[in-house]
Image (cartoon, coloured by chain):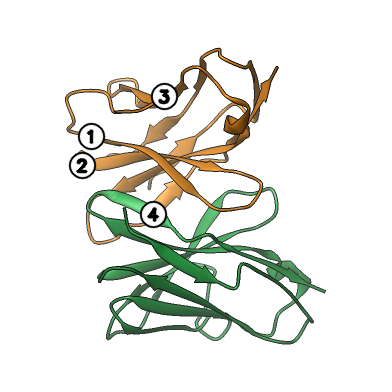
Chain colours: A orange, B green
Amino acid sequence: AQKITQTQPGMFVQEKEAVTLDCTYDTSDPSYGLFWYKQPSSGEMIFLIYQGSYDQQNATEGRYSLNFQKARKSANLVISASQLGDSAMYFCAMRVTGTASKLTFGTGTRLQVTL
Amino acid sequence: SAVISQKPSRDICQRGTSLTIQCQVDSQVTMMFWYRQQPGQSLTLIATANQGSEATYESGFVIDKFPISRPNLTFSTLTVSNMSPEDSSIYLCSVYEGTEAFFGQGTRLTVV
């Protein structure tokens, strides 16, 4: 079975600073994908970034980067130059490649960006 | 990225009634997924909807409570039947485009 662990229920960061949101995962399958989503108070799930288990380089998308450490089974999200609009819930998720294809989510981290 | 239109965006319903949520995708997809997010919780998969076959339900979810239709490759509906206050949640549909998974805007359901 797959499992995602996010140990930070809440985080604070000052505007313009960088912040790292932690995510560890557990799977015995060698082929998988890791996702990060942002959920503002409106409830929609906004896709941020994706990392495949065989990708050689860490994924980056604008101010978002994924610090992928395969041996440690961690996939931390780094947000650079935080903005007030980054305040939201952030979820880490995993998909094991195959017929199941469902996403397994962590419990989320609530990020608050302050002035 | 895939554009997913989900409606209604929110609703307040009386207990014992049913609500049907619609999900429209701008491209053809093999599988569509329905998730539930109870207040303050993470997302849990309800079922996977494949066109032309019965939906596959996860443990704890049954077809009588959450019937799903998938009439074509761009559309699906989820019905929440005989609602109780415990069904108050955000319901989201999701599809894959390549390796990436995208979600609709969500339906915020409150049962009173």
Q: Are marks 4 and 1 in contact (CB under 8 Å)?
A: no
Residue B28 vertical placement versus A75 (above, below) = below
Tell me how far mark 3 sits from mark 4, CA to CA: 19 Å
Tell whether A40 sits left or right of A79.
right
Quarter-of-image position of residue B17:
bottom right
Residue indicated by mark 4: B102
Q: Earlier in the sequence, mark 1 or mark 2?
A: 2
Residue indicated by mark 1: A53
Same chain? Circles 3 and 4: no
Q: Are marks 1 and 2 in contact (CB under 8 Å)?
A: yes
Q: Residue at x 28, y 77 (%)?
A: B73
Tell me how far mark 1 sits from mark 2, CA to CA: 6 Å
Question: Which chain letter goes with mark 4?
Answer: B
Label 4 sits on a secondary structure element that is: strand
Q: Are marks 3 and 4 in contact (CB under 8 Å)?
A: no
Residue type for callout 3:
Arg
Q: Quarter of the image containing the C terminus of chain A?
A: top right
Question: Which of the two residues, A99 or B98, is positioned nearer the viewer here?
Answer: B98
Q: Residue at x 39, y 54 (%)?
A: B102
Residue indicated by mark 3: A63
Tell me how far mark 3 sits from mark 1, CA to CA: 21 Å
Where residue B87 sits in the image (x, y, percent)?
69, 70
Q: Earlier in the sequence, mark 3 or mark 1?
A: 1
Tell me how far mark 2 sits from mark 3, CA to CA: 26 Å
Label 3 sits on a secondary structure element that is: loop
Residue type for callout 4:
Phe
Residue B66 vertical placement versus A96 (above, below) = below
Where residue A56 sits in the image (x, y, percent)?
17, 25
Residue type for callout 2:
Ser
Question: Which chain letter goes with mark 2?
Answer: A
